[in-house]
């Protein structure tokens, strides 16, 4: 299965997230055909089509809060019913939440 192609708007929102985070240790790259963000080599964000998957940690309050966003769900880039338990997909209908939860994902990864 080919990776879903993100729109220019989604790519621009991802670039805004990087700019807003303002950390030179955050790098934009690609994995399995998808744009990703890493912090010191650890992936914490993945753009899957129009959805932004963020590694928040399954037991964190931020994970639970993100799942309360309408249309948010566990991140399942394969779309085969095998979601990543620590990850949440933030929909494009909630772009104002991308930065908030990206900050939480960075903090989660830093703490590991």
Image (cartoon, rainbow, N blue to C red):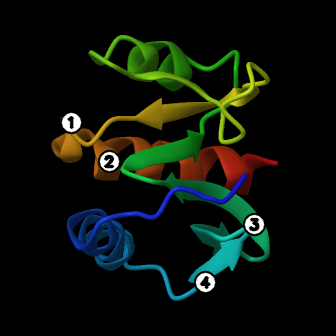
Mark toward the start of the polypeptide (3 vs 2): 3
Q: Which residue is depicted at the point 27% across and 15% down?
A: 70
The residue indicated by pointer 4 is: 25
Contact between labelled residues 1 and 2, with CB atoms less than 8 Å apart: yes
The residues bearing labels 2 and 1 have C-alpha atoms spaced at a distance of 7 Å
The residue indicated by pointer 2 is: 98
Q: Position of residue 63 (x, y in %)?
A: 54, 22
Question: From what the image shows, is residue 19 above or below residue 83?
Answer: below
Badge 4 density bin: few <14, some 14–19, many ≥20, Cα 10 Å: few
The residues bearing labels 4 and 1 have C-alpha atoms spaced at a distance of 26 Å
Q: Position of residue 24 (x, y in %)?
A: 52, 88
Query: Which mark is in front, 2 or 4?
Result: 2
The residue indicated by pointer 3 is: 32
Q: Position of residue 48 (x, y in %)?
A: 52, 52
The residues bearing labels 3 and 2 have C-alpha atoms spaced at a distance of 21 Å
Badge 1 density bin: few <14, some 14–19, many ≥20, Cα 10 Å: few
Front-most of residues 54 and 22: 54
Tag of residue 94:
1
The residues bearing labels 3 and 1 have C-alpha atoms spaced at a distance of 25 Å
Front-most of residues 53 and 24: 53
Badge 2 density bin: few <14, some 14–19, many ≥20, Cα 10 Å: many
Q: Position of residue 9 (x, y in %)?
A: 20, 67
Q: SS of the residue at dot 1?
A: loop
Front-most of residues 44 and 30: 30
């Amino acid at each position: 299965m080919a990776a879903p192609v993100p729109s220019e708007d989604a790519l621009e929102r991802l670039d805004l997230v990087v700019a807003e985070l303002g950390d030179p240790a955050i790098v934009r790259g690609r994995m399995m055909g998808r744009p990703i963000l890493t912090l010191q080599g650890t992936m914490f964000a993945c753009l899957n089509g129009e959805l932004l998957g963020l590694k928040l940690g399954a037991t964190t309050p931020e994970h639970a809060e993100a799942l309360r966003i309408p249309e948010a769900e566990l991140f399942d880039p394969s779309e085969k019913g095998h979601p990543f338990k620590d990850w949440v997909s933030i929909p494009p209908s909630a772009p104002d939440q991308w930065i908030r939860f990206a900050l939480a994902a960075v903090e989660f990864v830093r703490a590991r």
